[in-house]
Structure formats: structure tokens, C-alpha cells
Amino acid sequence: MKRAICSALFVLSLFFPVLTGASASAAETSYKESLLWGVNAEASSLDPATSKDTVTHMMMYQIYDALVKEAPGDYNRLVPGLAESWEFSDDNKTVTFHLRKGVKFHNGDTMTADDVLFSLQRSLESSYSSGISGAIDHFEKVDDGTVACVLKYPYSPILDVLSNMTFAIASKRAVEEAQASGVDFARNPCGTGAYRMVTWKSGDVLVLERFDDYYGGPAAIKNLTYKLVPDAASGAIALEDGTLDCYYLVAATDYNYLKGLDHIAYVECPGVGLHHITFNVTQGVFADKRVRQAVAYVLNRDDVVLGGAEGYAVVANCLAPTSVFGYLDDFQWYGQDLEKAKALLAEAGYPDGFDVVFSMQGSPTYMKPAEVVQDQLRKIGINVTFDKMERAAYLEDVGNKRNFAASLRMINATVRDADSVLTRRFHSSMLGGGNNYSGYSNPEVDALIERARTVSDREGRLALYRKIYEILREDVPLIPIYTDTVLLFFNADLKNVYAHPVYRYAVHDMYFQK
């Protein structure tokens, strides 16, 4: 027996309440028919089953739809996409989706349950979904208008998982015909989105055009071109002089200048990354909890934001990004207290401090905040030097071998839920080749993480996360620092542009107006 949709969705959607009905239509008119969007990298693949990077998904968001999507202007609300409604089973282990009727693919075919099942199961079996699909057992067709997602265990963020472009719906016939003829479907996509692909010139442009049979109605802007502009400075100049209508990603050093231009607008919101210090808690100087606590007491993280992120970040007081469900706004981390820091060091046997090497990726993304931390730690005699490594060497030494003392790094919430970060960084199942680089293992934390992901009550989940954060604050395997602010700059005449933590911008809703 299945619960009524209204009660099930109230309980299981949690931070993402679900609305029925289609999203708001784009404006009927636009004084410009073409939108030129600069990007710093081209798409890796336009096949949902073989892609997962942010810039690719930003482009795919125009070509494909998922069963569930975010409401225009409010990324914290999930609304119907290709599913017009859904309900959860009494045990919360099955989600049944009732498909929207009459949806057309770009090849003219009408979407069926077979297309949906094929796409979902194909993506589930792909390695590209492994970071977000662990709770899913399989998908099944119920009837010609219904499919079900069967879970291994109740998983509260499942709707957010299924809004990801990795689980977007492609035409079964188009995929199979491409495979049979030796055509690369990744470069010849066929979805149900508001735009369809016209041309993809590697190293130059991806050209899309409006799909007039889109189930949400035709977009106001007819042509959408993603132009490759790898250099951020060049992108900012092209945006300023009007060559580009939008650019992803403007460098933080150009934010203030562009903000001062009348013909440029911007939107901003917190991202999904958590910059943090990771300690090796299994060996070396940071195996002593008192030393880790001393570091926590010495840091002024507001200054790290200023020096490490040009001020465009929000201090995180929980071990989760500030934009995800499960982050607690009222939770308090360590405040700066140099005397407590010195006392803890002395108690641990380091009254005069010590020398230590931080293993680092050499990118400014990590080095700039790390250098601010380095300056602050000198105040209590901790002298930090850096071993700057290429990414491959870093992942091998720090990630696989845990051959390091400490590192400043960043993790993205692949699902916008605290479970995504807490599981990967702290659960003991992630030791030995997983994402638990610190070597932290605590059976109580394991049990709380496992419980929190299955509880259907919003407040109950938050209470469990509070307990986890309290334990982690005491043990300090990691120190949270900040979540970056995501900004998008664009032509001020472009309307209905909404901020999004992972760059899901619905061009369908946009239009140009003087």
C-alpha cells in the first residue's frame, strides 16, 4: 500500500518540498533571438550516462530533463519534471513516478516508460553515477505511464539525486540507433529539453536551437551558443564589451569591477563546496586530539575568507557546505582563543610549537587560504611549510596512501544533503581508497550517519546531524573553513536569470528586455 502523495512528499522531500504543476513559462517575447554564453571548458560528453562535471551538466540542462527538477528561482524546492507526480511506499524504499503524457523527444518520438526505464537503469549501471547512486537498487516499469525507483534502504535525499543530469532521460531509440551505426551518442544527444543540438565544433562552440515542441512551451530565446573562452580575463573583457551575453566562470579578482558596471548584472548564492583542513588522525603530530583542537582555536576563519577567497565565501561552522540540507545555522565551531590554543599545545607536549608540512595541490584555490592559515598558526609556534603537488601525485599520496600530516582541500556535496559529505569524509566504510582521507573511525558516528540518511522526518534528521557535528567538533578530524559564493555575471538586459549552487540555469525561462 502506498501513502497519499501529499503526505509522502511532505515527509520525504524534507528540505525540498515538492510542488505539482509545471514551472513558470518563459516570457513570450525577447528583443534578441540569440544568447552567446562563454564557458571556460567545453562539454566532456552530452550523454547523461557518461558525464558528471559541472560545466557539462550546465549545458546538458538545456538539452535534457529529469523526472524531478528545481523550481525556477528557488533551488530548494523540487517540482515535477518529466514525472507529473510521485509517491513513496509505506517503508520508504520505493518511489513510484507517474510520467507526464505527450512529452516529445528532439527526434519527434513521444516519451514512454520504456525510454525512462532504459535511461535510468543505463545511468545507474554507469560508473559516472557511482558517487550519488549508492542507495538505489534498481528501476522498474510498473505500466506504460509509470516507473518505480527501488531503494536498498530508505534514503531521504533520493529526489535530489534523481534531479541530477546523470539521471536525465534520453531517447532509447536514438541511443540504440547510434550504437548500432557506430555514431557517438555523446556528441549527438537526443533529449526532451527546451533546446536541441545543432552543431558541436570541438575547441570552439556548442550551438543549440529552440525545441518548439518542448512540453513546457517554446523558449523566448531561439538560439543558444556556448562559446569556449578558456581564459577568465578574456571572458570578463568579452562580457564587458558585449561580445558575450554571459560568462562562466569569471575570476574572483574581477568580481568587484564587473559589479560596478551598469550594463552587467549578476546573481549569487552559496556553492556546494566545503573548504576544510584535513588532519591525518592515525599517525604523526595530529594523531593527538589536543593538537587538532589547538589549531581550531588559533584560526580566525573570517580572515581566511578575506585572504583566501577575496571575501566571496561564507564561514562554515558545520562539517557540511552552508547551502545543503543538514547545515545548522545556529551551530557554533571554535572561536579564536590563542591562550587556549597554547595551553593545549603545552599539554600535548609542544610548549614551543613544532614544524609541520601541509601536503597541497598547487592551485591558488587551495594555496591562497592555506597561506592565510600558515600565517595564523605561526602565532602559537606551529611553523607550516608546503609540499605542493600535481593532482595525480596528490591523490595518490594523500588520498590513497594517506602519506601526509595535514592538508587544506575542498569537497563538493554531490547530492545537496549533509549525508553526501559526512559519509565520504567520516564513515569508516570510506577508509582504504575511499574519501575518508583523515583515517577517522568512530562507530557512533557511523551509526548516526546511517540513521540520519534513512529518517523521514526533517527535524529528526537535523537532530541527528547536530549530534554528529558535536562529536566531530570534539574530535576535530577536520576543520571547516568556508563555502565559496557562486556568482554569475551577464548582460543586464537578460531577465529571469536565477542563482544556482551547481549552475543549473534554465535558459528556457530567460528573455532579453531593455
Image: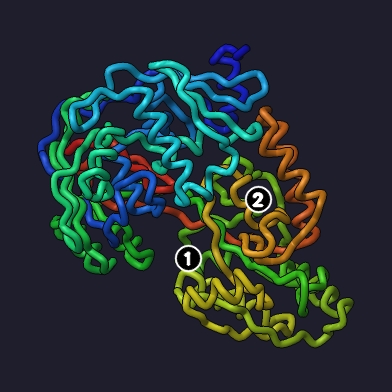
User: Which of the two residues, 511 or 361, is positioned nearer the viewer here?
Assistant: 361
Q: Residue at x 51, y 67 (%)?
A: 306
Is 240 drawn above or below residue 94 in the view shown?
Answer: below
Is 319 drawn above or below residue 83 in the view shown?
Answer: below
User: Which of the two residues, 66 or 39, is positioned nearer the viewer here?
Assistant: 66
Q: Secondary structure at mark 2?
A: helix
Q: Indicate which disc, 2 or 1, sits on the residue closer to the N terminus.
A: 1
Horizontal and vertical percent position of residue 79: 43, 26
Determine whether, in the image, residue 364 is placed left or right of residue 265. right
Horizontal and vertical percent position of residue 75: 44, 37
Read off the residue under disc 1: 309
Q: Amino acid at mark 1?
A: Ala
- Alpha-carbon neighbours of circle 2 within 10 Å: few (<14), some, or many (≥20)? some
Q: Quadrant of the C terminus?
A: top left
Q: Quadrant of residue 204?
A: bottom left
Residue 324 appears in the rendering: yes
Q: Residue at x 46, y 59 (%)?
A: 312
Residue 423 numbered tag = 2
Q: Amino acid at mark 2?
A: Thr
